[in-house]
Amino acid sequence: MNIKKFLFRAGVIGLALLTAPACENSDFLEVKPQGVINANNYFATSDHAIWATNAVYNQLRSWNLTSFPWLSMTDMVSDDATKGSFPADAQKLTTFDDFTFDSRFPEEIQLTWQGHYQGVFRANIAIEGIPKVPVMEESLRQRLLGESKFLRAHFYFNLARWFGDVPLILVPLTQNEFYTQSRTPVAQVYAQIIKDLTDAIPALPEKSMYDPADLGRVTKGAARGLLAKVYLTTKDYPNAEKYALEVINSKEYALLADYAKIFLPEGENSSESVWEVQATALEDSYGGATPWNMVQGVRGTPNLGWGFNLPSDDLVKSYERGDPRRDATILEVGEALPDGSDLVQDNKEMEGERYNQKAWTPSHALLQDNGPSNLRMLRYADVLLLAAEALNENGKAQDALTYLNQVRKRARGTRNVLPDITITNKDQLREAIWRERRSELAMEQHRWFDLLRTGRAAATMKALGKNFVVGKHELFPIPQTEIALSGGNLIQNPGY
């Protein structure tokens, strides 16, 4: 069975039996009703272990992890994008553009917290329950545990970057424990993220070792690549170099020849894919899809979506002269859709009308919200640039240039643009690598995290006239609902 359909259908079984009654549309601190089947009596067969793991994957496609909450706290808050649509539509999202959000408004911050802890909850059930399966192929048991630990690390990596100190919950909570959680120092959270990923690496197969039906599950390369990014974020440059180079030296990945094709259906799970969230437009259900395409689709004619998360003027101006990635990223009024089926017509209600071309998707089953496109979470180009950055910080400029220029060579194709970078001054090369990351990864929800980890968020936002407050806006507020439910155990971030 195709991995997209398999992860949906099998995941729904595990989700329905284990987690949906306990966490859907509720806070992680709320008391969970008792179900007939729970983690204590469920893990009897290897199928149960697979379904429980698939339920963790299923969370990656939820509204809270792919729509307004995700896009507003990655792209819209950065210099890459604006809210989009027309001014009065979802006006609450302008709070991310002008830094007027707080602990009570808008709800996207609460939904982000909720969605990621729902993922943690499901991962904890799988991690605790899979070892209890009495008869199971041991390699499968370890692989599923590795997948679940990778996904838990992913959820906590996002939470730590957004909120700093967060509750570190590693087991399914009992009813009496929901209201007792307090914030764990972020260094300890990162230590657990690193442990989960290092535990996962030996248990996970390389991408080439998966059966075709399982293509899309997390791999050894995905764990190494995410670990490289974690180490770069914590400024452990030797380990960032080590794990990025392990991905590169595995020979499992290669840059796709044509940058523009990465984001088309033919680019899904391609040679460049290190990790993608799988999605599909089923004929009889919306359950395999995400709203990611619809939320960012052309608003008006052709009617492909809601027109949010528009590339900013600053992003447009940031590209080097002739960079083909600009046209592959930004869909302008008057331009043909990637499949040539229509032209984007001017929508008079829109301000700064242009669209994220990477979110475009061709015709598919059912309506717009049945979005079938995979979310490219970690690409090989990203890993090459992680390696270049770490190598430069480690005093290996020539090696850094090798990987930086691989990315630029692919981007220029046959055009006489984007010449190789030759500078070896550490500070100048660092700036060149950061600029390359923006051009290469624009509108893929990496920019805000890059600005934070490199200490450039304040200067970048202030240069654009944003209301960024140093010492406050580097973190988002802990949702006030969570603080109230904890009885004050959760302490608010500074300034909110």
Image (spheres, helix red, strand yellow):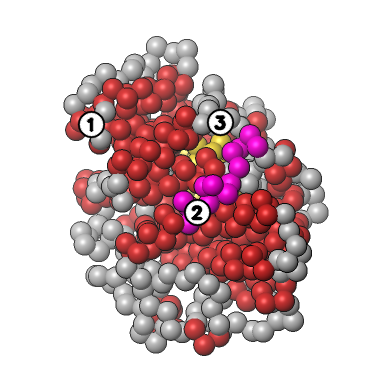
Task: Say which quadrant the N terminus sits in.
Answer: top right
Toward the viewer: 244 or 112?
244
Which residue is disc 1 drawn over?
A: 395
Within 10 Å of the Cα at label 3, are there few (<14), some (14-19), or many (20+) other Cα atoms? some
Question: Contact, CB < 8 Å: mark 1 with mark 2?
Answer: no
Which residue is disc 2 drawn over?
A: 199
Q: What residue range appears in magenta?
A: 196-209
**The residue under label 2 is which amino acid type?**
Asp
Q: Is residue 127 magenta?
A: no
Provide residue 77's location: percent of width, then percent of height. Answer: 37, 53
Q: Is residue 474 left or right of residue 33?
A: left
At 65% from the left and 31% from the top, the residue drawn is 266
Residue 273 versus residue 340 in the image, above or below: below
Provide residue 112's location: percent of width, then percent of height. Answer: 48, 64
**The residue under label 1 is which amino acid type?**
Gly
Residue 203 in view of the camera: yes
Q: Is residue 205 magenta?
A: yes
Q: Which mark is residue 252?
A: 3
Residue 273 sits in which quadrant? Answer: top right
Residue 409 versus residue 125 in the image, above or below: above
Provide residue 24's location: percent of width, then percent of height. Answer: 61, 72
Q: Secondary structure at mark 2?
A: helix
Q: Is residue 349 left or right of residue 429?
A: right
Q: Is residue 96 left or right of residue 15?
A: left
